[in-house]
Image (cartoon, rainbow, N blue to C red):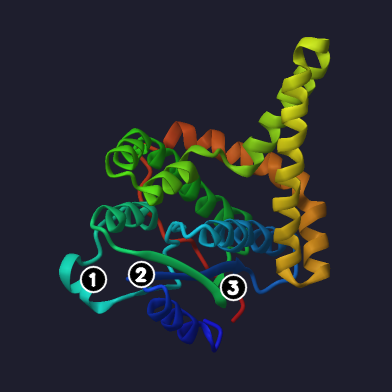
Amino acid sequence: PESDALDAANARLEGVPADVVQVALISRGSKRDDLSAMDWWTTTLIGRVRARGLSAFGLPSRLQGAGMAIRADVLRRIGWPTTGISEDFFATLAFLDHGIRLAYTDAGIVWARGAETDSAARSQRLRWESGKLLSLQKLPGIVEKAIKRRSASHLAIGAHVAVPPTTVHFTMLAVFGAVGLLVGRRGRTVAVASAAGLGALSVYMMEGLRLMEDREMARRALLAGPRFVVWKTRVQLDAVRRFRHLGWERTSREGMAE
């Protein structure tokens, strides 16, 4: 944690008020290489850009497994409510179901040690992508609760689940836009909508680079992006085959420099 992370969490607990606060959790390796740069960029997108947007509308962002501040009375009352390969997401749902108020702050940052080998990064990403697929199975129930309870918080978490990963989202918009252009006038609306979506997604991604506040690592991440898309697509396909049977496994950090 940065030196002001706990003060930032406490200020958010008292100021909202809230019962659980997620402090911005950003992952990077100790090396200044492409793997660390991509880890930094992608976790900044989820852990800061998206979370900031939700927070600006008074909506909760999902918990992220570390960097959480939880009131003691909440833990005494319901404990840590779940387990599994995506327990942070399912804990988010469980807390919302219990009426627990979730908030976010990036006035402080908690840094996670990122995977520094391809095999460790693949194992970690496979777990994350599998958790995403498992969470999709909960989407109908989340939407039902959002409607019955008139809960904007459940709706926001449902949207988080429904929106595809950035690489998939970008590819879908590009394909729809190309098809819209190919079919001529009838596809103009689709092409324009796809172009607008690509523009918005590009702004989102560029904001992540800006918040990295390290021009060299941001440049590394941007240049490594196409290779990362190919690599991640392979991991996602593997996750589709294995997500129902995948167990939780801690990411290996053997051989990592202190």
Looking at the figure, which quarter contains the C terminus?
bottom right
Looking at the image, is mark 1 or mark 3 nearer the viewer?
A: 1
Q: Residue at x 56, y 50 (%)?
A: 122
- How packed mark 3 is, by other alpha carbons closer than 10 Å (few <14, some 14-19, many 20 or more), is some
Q: Amino acid under label 3? A: Met
Q: Residue at x 62, y 59 (%)?
A: 49
Asked whether disc 1 touches disc 2, contact meaning CB atoms under 8 Å apart, the reply is yes
Label 3 element class? loop
Amino acid type of the residue tagged 2 in the rendering: Val
* Quarter of the view holding residue 46: bottom right
Of the numbered discs 1 and 3, the one sitting upstream in the chain is 1
Label 1 or label 2, whichever comes before in sequence order: 2
Disc ID at residue 20: 2
Left or right, residue 112 beside residue 68: right
Residue 14 image position (x, y, % from top left): 38, 80
Residue 13 drawn at (x, y percent): 39, 77
Label 1 to label 2, Cα distance in Å? Answer: 8 Å
Taking the image as shown, residue 245 lies to the left or right of residue 191, namely: left
Q: Residue at x 58, y 56 (%)?
A: 50
Residue at numbered disc 1:
74
Q: Secondary structure at mark 1?
A: helix
Q: Earlier in the sequence, mark 3 or mark 2?
A: 2
The numbered dot on residue 256 is: 3
Q: As drawn, which residue projects farthest toward the left?
A: 77
Q: Nearer the viewer, residue 18 or 116?
A: 18
